[in-house]
Amino acid sequence: MKGIKILGVLIFLAVTVSAQETTKSLSLQEAIDYAIKNSYDAKAAENDIASAKKRVWETTTIGLPQIDAKVDYQNWIKQQVSLLPAAAFDNTSSVVETVEQYFGITPTSTPSTPEGFLPLTFGTKQNLNATITLRQLLFDGSYLVGLQSARTFLKISEQAKEKTEQGVREAVINAYGNVLIAEKSIDILENNKKILEKNLNETKKIFENGLNEEEDVEQLEITLGNIKSQLNNVKRMKAIAYQMLNITLGSSISTQLILTDSLDSLTERNINFSLISQSFNLNNHIDFKIAENDRESKRLLMRYEQSKALPTLSAFVNYGTTANSDSFSFFNSNQQWFNSSLLGVSLNVPIFSSFQRRSKTAQAKIALETADIRLEETKQKLNLQAEKAKSDYQLSIENYETAKRNVSLAERIENKQRIKFFEGISSSFELTQAQNQLYTQQQSYIQSMLDVIAKKAALETALNIKTK
């Protein structure tokens, strides 16, 4: 019995831990911080930076010492035969003696006449050669430019990560807001449904007593049917909105999320009129920095093409040892090894390339001029973008205040029409109009709250403001 209790406790703890691992409770800022570290785009940007750092080192190593080792082993299964003209010697015996004296080998056969050829095999059946070589680049203009380009590429990758973080931040704000909109819409639609059901029941009773027309009942049934359809659709959209938020965060779509911020509180916190009057610093904007680095990369490309006309200088030194044997005796203590070493310097001077280098340099110069044009275009676009973002943000606040007032007015109008309807003063058509107007204003009000939050995020991005 005691063992069963312990097992039950362990199962309970395991279920609790599992639930905690698959459930996240997040405010909007916590969601942004989490996504910047864990979103798919953020992780890819981190990998791009890591790759760029390796590329810098790869380029750097070109100018550092390079050491290579090489071992060659050869075994003649059947040795190659060379033919030596016998006529070069006085007689056959002198040929044999000369070969034995100077070459230390005995001919495999003796030609019958001095006009023939003497077949010979040179060397041993097996050879082993080991070499180690040190190479050092002494001067190469393209290497120096390439090193600068690799560092610029790293800077571009780091700036791309910063740009990615801005995009992730805006994506999280919109995804988080869409979930809150779905939840807010469900609350409003549930309340509308409850009121309509009450109105419909009361209208049916009045109709049964013969005090109104059947059309009044049918009109309310149509409105209630539309509300139910909208409610079911919003519930489905809510589930999708949660999955989209999980994807934006970099989590599994099955992760259970608990959002601790409400749409109303976020809207109030994101109303900040001081942002509208804030000045725009172009030089600190990430898009401008990216455009500047693009121009720098084009300038370095031109320098690279120009550097190809410069000479290159490199040096090497190697050390090797060779052994020869008719059998595999290279590891015997009495095996004889012959050492060698070589030092060399190589100078390569480009002289004439049929104007190929000049053509490539001209192309790189044109690319640099285009980058200058794009840089100026970026300046103008960023200034316009900042002004437009300010205008959009101010408009979103104004729309929110208007929508807030309109909802209050629409609620009062709908309430008055409902009272008049049940008193027999107004028709069901007038009540339906008031209800539809209320529902439209409710949706506009919800959307205006998200617009305030999203437009503020867009303005902060346009002004390159980093917030926490």
Image: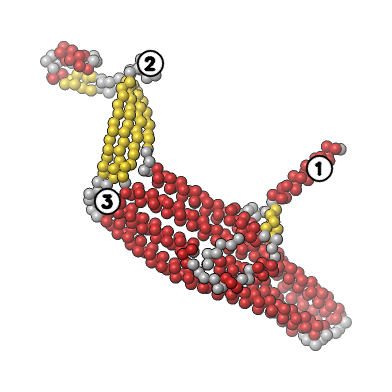
The amino acid on which the numbered mark 2 sits, given as a three-letter code, is Ser
- Image-based side of 108 in relation to 207, left or right: left
Q: Check disc 3 and report the residue beneath it.
A: 309
Q: Is residue 345 above or below residue 257?
A: above
Say few, some or many: other residues with alpha carbon within 10 Å of mark 2 (under 14 / 14 to 19 / 20 or more).
Answer: few
Indicate the amino acid at tag 1.
Gly
Which residue lies under the disc numbered 1?
8
Cβ–Cβ below 8 Å for labels 2 and 3?
no
Mark 3 is surrounded, within 10 Å at the Cα level, by few (under 14), some (14 to 19) or many (20 or more) other residues, namely some
Q: Is residue 460 left or right of residue 428?
A: left
Q: Choose top left, top right, bottom left or bottom right for residue 293.
A: bottom left
Residue in front for this viewpoint, 217 or 88: 88
Read off the residue under disc 2. 333
Q: CA distance from mark 2 to mark 3?
A: 54 Å
As rendered, which of 283 and 172 lies closer to the eye? 283
Q: Earlier in the sequence, mark 3 or mark 1?
A: 1
- Residue at 57% x, 59% y: name it: 168
- Circle 2: element type: loop
Q: Quadrant of the N terminus?
A: top right
Q: Secondary structure at mark 3?
A: loop
Residue 204 is drawn in which quadrant? bottom right
Tell me the residue at 77%/43% (across/down).
Answer: 11
- Tell me the element at label 1: helix
- Is residue 436 visible in the rendered image? The answer is no
Please name the amino acid that badge 3 sits on: Ala
What's the distance in space between the residues labelled 2 and 1, CA to CA?
74 Å
